[in-house]
């Protein structure tokens, strides 16, 4: 019982630190790993509460469940990739979950082969073969754990209830289809409409998105038309129709907000998978805002989240840290330990 109580105290301390850091700044990448750390530390306490003590049988059950989940991941990713191709076509972006599922599956099989190889006699695999297999497994596990931490924190952001008293609501564009608003963008606009109608002092809505090379008009104008058709007064809508990227969306929208008098409490509405990157960009340009995510079709979410993960790791600082972590893990194998 004392061990369980000690674990609960540690859990409370770690979750309190995490809550304070997130309250201060939700956009930091370290929050992903802090949330994962808090979750991992919580596991022993939950085992003790459920089983009454820290028994080896309880730990074995948890390990087996985790192993089952890990083995299911590549299967689920491949299945999602096939569904994406059927519904969205053969574009490169739609292949992401399929490719990741195959890579994770290869890594898991490499790990199994590495474990089996150490049980063989000297006539079995050479140590170099074992090292290659083990390196493949460690690399995949490292990347997978980083991605899962990112995914869990992205989900967590969607659970934080937003405030309702806003002066501006920025709605990010996502592309048009034949000049019309597609489902993904309509979900963002519907979210903005709900925010607008719940506010006792209706905010100004900024539709943000320029005209693509294959589009008949700007996204901002199509979005504004959709809002008007759904009951938002035209005089409460501001168009930002020059941007072509997420960062430009935010910079141009910030310029509009800064030019207006009064308070500037701002909500930033985009798809739920896109919120984290948007609030990071907003922090970089000095735009104080609350990120609010709109729903997306469940089958679309994994591939979209993979794109977000890659986009964030294209930032030099995070790319260097990611590679440095991988190198540290590889050192024992390189040194032959």
Image (cartoon, grey):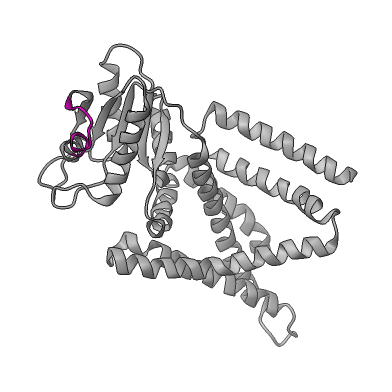
Q: Residue at x 75, y 65 (%)?
A: 61
Which residue appears farthest toward the left when viewing the image? 216
The vertical placement of 299 against 322, above or below, is below
The vertical placement of 152 against 281, above or below, is below
Q: Residue at x 63, y 52 (%)?
A: 328
Indicate left or right for 280 with 2 as reference: left
x and y, in percent, of residue 276 in the image: 44, 40
x and y, in percent, of residue 158 in the image: 48, 41
x and y, in percent, of residue 168 in the image: 32, 24
Q: Residue at x 37, y 55 (%)?
A: 297
Which residue appears farthest toward the bottom when viewing the image? 123
Q: In front: 57, or 309?
A: 57
> Does the stretch in magenta take in 230?
yes
Q: Quadrant of the C terminus?
A: bottom right
Indicate left or right for 62 with 179 as reference: right
The vertical placement of 170 against 215, above or below, is above
Q: Quadrant of residue 198?
A: top left
x and y, in percent, of residue 3 in the image: 87, 45
Q: Is residue 327 visible?
A: yes
Q: Is residue 337 visible?
A: no
Q: How many marks?
A: 0
Q: In front: 153, or 243?
A: 153
Which residue appears farthest toward the right when viewing the image? 2
Q: In front: 130, or 94?
A: 94
Indicate left or right for 240 with 125 as reference: left
> Does the stretch in magenta take in 193?
no
Q: Which residues are magenta?
A: 226-234
């Amino acid at each position: 019982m004392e061990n369980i109580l000690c674990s609960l105290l540690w859990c409370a301390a770690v979750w309190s630190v995490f809550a304070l850091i997130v309250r201060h700044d939700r956009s930091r990448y370290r929050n992903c790993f802090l949330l994962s750390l808090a979750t991992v530390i919580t596991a022993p306490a939950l085992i003790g509460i459920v089983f009454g003590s820290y028994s080896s049988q309880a730990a074995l059950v948890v390990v087996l469940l985790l192993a089952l989940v890990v083995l299911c991941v590549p299967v689920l990713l491949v299945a999602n990739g096939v569904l994406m191709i059927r519904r969205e076509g053969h574009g490169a972006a739609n292949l992401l979950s399929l490719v990741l599922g195959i890579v994770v599956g290869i890594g898991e099989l490499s790990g199994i082969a590495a474990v089996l190889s150490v049980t063989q006699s000297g006539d079995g695999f050479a140590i170099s073969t074992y090292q290659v297999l083990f390196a493949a497994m460690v690399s995949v596990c490292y990347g997978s754990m980083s991605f899962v931490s990112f995914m869990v924190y992205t989900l967590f952001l969607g659970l934080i209830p937003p405030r309702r008293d806003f002066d501006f609501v920025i709605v990010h564009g996502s592309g048009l289809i034949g000049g019309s608003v597609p489902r993904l963008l309509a979900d963002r606009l519907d979210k903005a409409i709900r925010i607008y109608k719940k506010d006792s002092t209706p905010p100004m809505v900024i539709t943000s998105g320029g005209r693509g090379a294959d589009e008949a008009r700007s996204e901002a104008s199509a979005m504004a038309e959709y809002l008007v058709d759904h009951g938002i007064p035209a005089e409460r809508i501001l168009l930002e129709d020059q941007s072509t990227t997420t960062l430009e969306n935010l910079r141009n929208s910030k310029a509009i907000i800064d030019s207006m008098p009064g308070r500037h409490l701002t909500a930033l509405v985009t798809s739920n998978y896109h919120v984290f990157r948007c609030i990071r960009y907003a922090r970089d340009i000095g735009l104080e805002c609350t990120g609010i995510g709109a729903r997306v079709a469940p089958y679309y979410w994994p591939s979209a989240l993979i794109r977000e993960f890659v986009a964030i790791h294209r930032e030099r600082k995070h790319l260097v840290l990611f590679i440095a972590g991988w190198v540290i893990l590889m050192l024992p194998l390189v040194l032959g330990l």
